Amino acid sequence: MVNLKMFEEYSSSQPKTMELLMSQTLEFLIPDENPETLNLKRKRSFPYKPTTSTFKTAKKLEKKLTEYGYSVTYYPKLSDQENKLLAIKNRLDYSDEIGWDYGPLLLVELSGSEKCAIYLDKGDKQGKHSVHFQKIERGFEVIYFKKATESEIHCLFWNEKEMVEGKFEDVDRHIEPGKDREDPIYITFVSYETSDKKEYFIEGEFYGTYEAGYEFESIYDMGFYEEEK
């Protein structure tokens, strides 16, 4: 007990870096794996096996990170009763009746003004789960894509103040002058449904051809949408 207390005090005094947070999180979620073998500098998603519901796992992780001295905000921001109901639904058949159509997320304060989002997905059809890390340095940041096609994007994102669930549809696409088909096409999406009722846009970078279709590559720009008058 004394050694554990000393370790927690030592951890609390350490600079809160992305790599340290990832290492401590993975030690908790994957205790049989050495974080040094997981290539923390390059990878941002890692498979793990939850021992209970995803939401209960996230709550336990929140408690552990708080003991290490981190400031942690848990999402979804619901009452205790709603969180219990969400955990039950997660074990059975996940539903968005409560108004949160994603897995749990922990927003962690790092040293300086940086933040890191730790997202525990709900698992795929084979029951395989992953934990995802996304550093937030400034501005908008997509944390997790549920869907990203040339016609629609569904994602969980940071809007500089809060986590927002958003659904977007394409409204415009263009190729930079002089570019050929091996270069990206830029598709603009505008939100048609968001959890905070505000409007946003996403400009995505896609690769492919008109005949075969285009595949999502990355976010080129994102922000609040203001319709031209």
Image (spheres, rainbow, N blue to C red):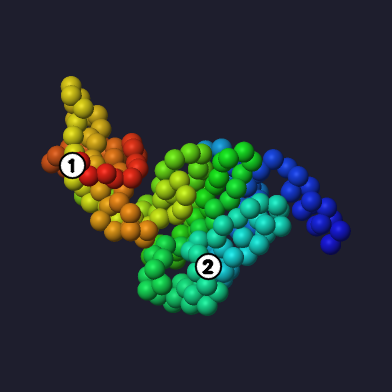
Instruction: Give the residue type at disc 2.
Output: Phe
Please state, as top left, top right, bottom left or bottom right, where the N terminus lies in the image: bottom right
**Residue 109, relative to residue 98: is it above or below?**
above
Identify the residue at the far top of this view. Answer: 178
Please state, as top left, top right, bottom left or bottom right, where the C terminus lies in the image: top left
Q: Position of residue 23 (x, y in %)?
A: 64, 47
Q: Nearer the viewer, residue 35 or 120?
A: 120
Q: Position of residue 15 (x, y in %)?
A: 69, 40
Q: What residue is rendered at 50% in x and 43% in y?
A: 136
Q: Helix, strand, or loop for circle 1?
A: loop
On residue 191, the disc is: none
Question: Dot 2 surroundings within 10 Å: few (below 14), some, or many (20 or more)?
Answer: many
Q: Earlier in the sequence, mark 2 or mark 1?
A: 2
Q: What residue is rendered at 50% in x and 61% in y?
A: 75
Q: What residue is rendered at 86% in x and 58% in y?
A: 2
Q: Position of residue 227 (x, y in %)?
A: 22, 44
Q: Helix, strand, or loop for circle 2?
A: helix
Instruction: Give the residue type at disc 1.
Output: Lys
The residue singled out by tag 2 in the image is: 55
Which of the two discs, 2 and 1, sits closer to the camera?
1
**Residue 218, relative to residue 47: is it above or below?**
above
Q: Is residue 216 visible?
A: no
The residue singled out by tag 1 in the image is: 229
Q: Is residue 150 left or right of residue 79?
A: left
Q: Position of residue 49 (x, y in %)?
A: 54, 62
